[in-house]
Image: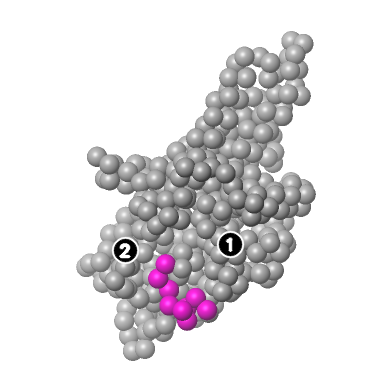
């Protein structure tokens, strides 16, 4: 076991941290939510470091980062601006099926759209109004026709949808055998028959845009489907995409928890009660110790899952555990931080108040935590 970062990793993290502290965090703190929604400047800033979708291989214009280095980057962004981290997580999620099983032509067409200074966004369209983790409740259907497929149905709570260059869509091709007929499609966002039915005004993850998509006889040619092969069925492709995505939610959770801890620690150092800093009171000191310890637990679990992915080992249980534990810890840490800050933690628009809301939603992203427990139980019991 080697927990040391390479020189390249340290340099990249220093660059990302400097960018976050000097540019992104002041920008985020100085603007109202309505001013953030369609501003591409933060993406352009990340694009200068080519980290809008850093796992894309170098031959397609990306950095070709492994998963553990990507998790380090996500933690830094989340500690500064959780909503921006969610946007990057979604990009990474959307390209994963392409990286795993896409054809060379599909990769050449779509991956360069998310690289470089002008990098765009992508969406992952899976959840529906009738259900998320329950594939048998899926209604969106891809009907085979001459030269391609006709898509009918809808997808709900689709991150990045309003600004996406393309969508990664999962739909069934047979309503009687939904799981076995699940297929993945890559769709240009401006495809005729694909429209936004509803925009969501969320109280969490400011900057991340969500929408409901409707597919009304949207025609896709045969090149849009990611074809099954000896390694990946549609269902297995979905499962591995989620498994990898969960560790990035773990990294986002660690970043949020770290930011809340730093706020609480700084406040406990500056605030005096009964003639001494708040951190010198044992109850507060113990809370800070609990927070720091749990953050490190979440970080190490996330790193282990990332390492297993990069090694090509079995990572399903590790990724579910990392996502479940880290998102829970993010909630615990933000709550303890709020207790230390007292009334200041509940000022509307304060960073700690934002972090508390952002931490809460992470228990539902990439599969609710109860689903993670079901996955873990099915594999270890």
Q: Can you say whether 320 is above or below 233 in the image? A: above
State the residue at coordinates (46%, 68%): 99
Q: Which residues are magenta?
A: 100-108
Q: Secondary structure at mark 1?
A: loop
Which residue is labeled 2 in the image? 235
Q: Is residue 24 magenta?
A: no
Q: Can you say whether 323 is above or below 219 in the image? A: above
* N-terminal-most mark, 2 or 1: 1
Which residue is labeled 1 in the image? 54
Q: Tell me if residue 205 can be seen.
A: no
Query: Is 95 placed left or right of 73 in the picture?
Result: left
Q: Can you say whether 318 is above or below 42 in the image? A: above
Q: Nearer the viewer, residue 70 or 149?
A: 70
Q: Secondary structure at mark 2?
A: helix
State the residue at coordinates (24%, 40%): 381
Q: Are marks 2 and 1 in contact (CB under 8 Å)?
A: no
Residue reaching furthest to the left = 176
């Amino acid at each position: 076991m080697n927990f040391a970062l390479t020189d390249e990793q340290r340099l990249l993290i220093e660059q990302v941290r400097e960018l976050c502290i000097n540019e992104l965090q002041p920008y985020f703190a100085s603007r109202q939510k309505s001013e953030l929604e369609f501003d591409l400047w933060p993406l352009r800033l990340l694009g200068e470091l080519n980290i809008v979708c850093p796992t894309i291989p170098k031959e397609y214009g990306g950095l070709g980062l492994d998963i553990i280095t990507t998790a380090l980057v996500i933690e830094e962004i989340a500690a500064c601006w959780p909503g921006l981290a969610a946007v990057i997580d979604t990009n990474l999620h959307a390209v994963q099926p392409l990286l795993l099983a896409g054809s060379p032509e599909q990769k050449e067409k779509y991956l360069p759209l998310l690289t470089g200074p002008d990098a765009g966004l992508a969406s992952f369209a899976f959840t529906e109004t009738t259900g998320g983790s329950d594939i048998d409740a899926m209604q969106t259907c891809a009907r085979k026709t001459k030269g391609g497929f006709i898509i009918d149905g809808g997808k709900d709570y689709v991150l990045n949808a309003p600004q996406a260059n393309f969508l990664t869509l999962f739909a069934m091709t047979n309503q009687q055998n939904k799981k076995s007929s699940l297929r993945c499609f890559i769709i240009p966002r401006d495809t005729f028959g694909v429209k936004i039915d509803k925009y969501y005004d969320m109280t969490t993850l400011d900057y991340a845009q969500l929408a409901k998509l409707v597919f009304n006889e949207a025609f896709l040619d045969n090149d849009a489907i990611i074809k099954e092969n000896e390694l990946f069925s549609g269902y297995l492709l979905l499962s591995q995409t989620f498994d990898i995505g969960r560790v990035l939610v773990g990294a986002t959770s660690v970043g949020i928890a770290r930011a809340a801890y730093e706020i609480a620690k700084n406040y406990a150092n500056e605030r005096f009660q009964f003639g001494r800093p708040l951190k010198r009171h044992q109850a507060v000191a113990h809370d800070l110790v609990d927070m720091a310890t749990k953050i490190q637990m979440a970080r190490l679990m996330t790193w282990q899952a990332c390492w297993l992915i990069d090694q090509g080992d079995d990572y399903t249980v590790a990724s579910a555990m990392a996502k479940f534990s880290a998102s829970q810890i993010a909630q615990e840490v933000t709550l303890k931080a709020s207790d230390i800050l007292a009334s200041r933690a509940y000022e509307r628009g304060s960073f700690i108040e934002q972090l508390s809301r952002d931490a809460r939603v992470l228990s539902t992203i990439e599969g609710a935590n109860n689903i993670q427990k079901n996955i873990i139980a099915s594999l270890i019991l």
